[in-house]
Image: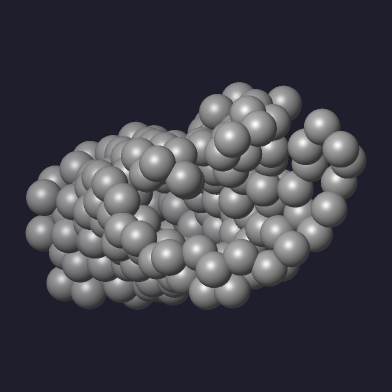
Amino acid sequence: MSVKRQVFLMGALCAVSALPVFAQSASVVRSNSFEVGGFLGASFGIDRYRVMGGGNVTYALNKWLLPYAEFSYFPGIGRVEEGTFPGTGRPFELRYSLPLADYHGGVHIRIPIRESRMVPYGVFGLGAVRSFGGTVDATFSDATGTRTTQLERPSSTNFAVNYGGGLRYYINQRFGIRAEAKAYRPTGDNFNRTFGKVEFGFFLQLR
């Protein structure tokens, strides 16, 4: 299953799970308020699920639109590079892992449900992913078979877009928890494959 489809299904599940809940006060969804929170989760879509974490801050222009800024740190995320060996023209594929940091801003689009503490939302953001350099053990395949070697990979910073959806649950007017699924599309030469993350966290709503 593709990363885009996984993110869509997770976001849709969050939205559908909120629909039956109509027994709580909607006053917890406020305008002109800040939300500050942290989260833990996992990245996925390139090689396997890997632990990640971060934090964000949002400001509610109204009950629907929340501009936000966010930072995420991925201790290790898989990379795949393809190319050909100079002179021979033999194809190769490198697989290795390096840390990644994400800095971006965007908007949460809340969908308040009358008299419900559960609020689904969509998310879209723009920013940069910082790829940290280092020496890696790279496994590569060519026409002669599979081998492993050490390579020095440079650091880089590349533009990226991200999109997804999630679900907030307001415990009261100050505290809440949320779940979110999001896909990233980097634009770097060596790191341009779409990957995703699933996260769970808390937030504090400030007036």
Q: Is residue 194 left or right of residue 84?
A: left
For residue 133, above or below residue 168: below
Image point (59%, 35%), residue name = 87
Tell me which corner region of the image, top left, top right, bottom left or bottom right, holds residue 141.
top right
Its colouring scheme is: one colour
**Residue 178 picture location, percent across and down:** 49, 57
Image point (67%, 48%), residue name = 94
**Residue 197 picture location, percent across and down:** 56, 50
Residue 78 seen by the camera: yes
From this viewpoint, which residue is outermost toward the right?
145
Tell me which corner region of the image, top left, top right, bottom left or bottom right, holds residue 170.
bottom left
Q: Is residue 124 left or right of residue 189?
A: left
Residue 22 seen by the camera: no
From this viewpoint, which residue is outermost toward the front?
87
Tell me which corner region of the image, top left, top right, bottom left or bottom right, holds residue 45.
top right
Q: Quadrant of the C terminus?
A: bottom left
For the residue pair 142 and 121, the one nearer the viewer reads as 142
Image point (22%, 74%), residue name = 206
Image point (11%, 50%), residue name = 61
**Residue 117 picture location, percent across and down:** 44, 51
For the residue pair 140 and 28, the one nearer the viewer reads as 140
For the residue pair 139 and 64, the one nearer the viewer reads as 139
**Residue 191 picture location, percent across and down:** 47, 46
